Amino acid sequence: MQDPYVIMTTGFKNSVTGGAITGYQVKIRIPYYRGVYLSAVDYLKLSVDGVDIPRDDLRIAVNGRTFTMPEMEEAGDTRWFYGDPATLLVAKSGGLVPGIHTITVGITIRKSYFPAQDPEHLYDFFGLWKSGKYEPFIEPPTVITKKVTLVQ
């Protein structure tokens, strides 16, 4: 729905700590029509120039707080509001060379109106009971690719 606006063209730059380039950052927006708690982000993947960024090298900053991927999955007290940018921070010594880079973001937002469990079988009409076991309804990731210029 919001795909053209997810990867922002501003805020793509190398990160500098103590005078040394320690990585880079990409700003993104939520691909959903409303804000969610950060723990509702079920899947988040970043690729730059066709190279997947390992989860251990990726952080997300929302509302002035920075989280590792495991911390993000537990951040039930931090909201990511519609339209507000989040910053993906990548640890990479030397950062990226200036120029055009292809950014790909894959993200899945768990819908708050679907329960994590359904012991009363109230949502059977969604086909969530497979092989006699309930499976939460999680959509496949939204995948967005955009060419962005790093100037620095």
Image (cartoon, rainbow, N blue to C red):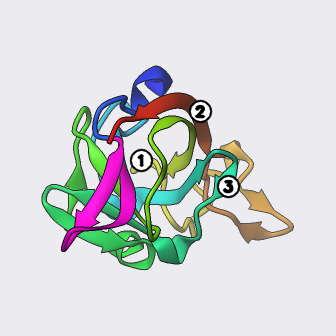
Find the magenta span and give its range: 12-25
Q: Secondary structure at mark 1?
A: loop
Kind of residue sitting beneath label 3: Val
Name the spot of residue 90 as percent of width and height, x first.
43, 63
* Residues at marks 3 and 1, CA–CA distance in whole angstroms: 34 Å
Q: Can residue 75 be seen at all in this image of the molecule?
A: no
Q: Which callout, 1 or 2, points to the residue nearer the camera?
A: 2
In this rendering, position of residue 13 left or right of residue 31: left
Q: Quadrant of the C terminus?
A: top left
N-terminal-most mark, 3 or 2: 3
Eyeballing the image, is 138 above or below 103? below
Residues under numbered marks 3 and 2 in contact, where contact means CB atoms less than 8 Å apart: no
| Magenta region includes residue 148 | no
**Residue positioned 81% across, 69% down in the render:** 132
Relative image position of residue 38 (x, y in whole percent):
32, 60
Q: Within 10 angstroms of label 1, few (less than 14), some, or many (20 or more) residues? A: few
Secondary element type, mark 2: strand
Q: Nearer the viewer, residue 51 or 20?
A: 20
Q: Report the residue at 74% width, 48% height from top.
A: 127
Kindly identify which residue carries mark 2. 145
Task: Report the residue marked by disc 3.
Answer: 51
Q: Amino acid at mark 1?
A: Tyr
**Front position in the image: 18 or 79:** 18
Mark 3 burial class by Cα count in 10 Å: few <14, some 14-19, many 20+: few
Residue 114 location, x and y as percent?
48, 51
Q: Which residue is mark 1?
A: 113
Marks counted in the figure total 3
Classify mark 2: residues with Cα within 10 Å, few (<14), some (14-19) or many (20+). some
Quadrant assignment, res 27: top left
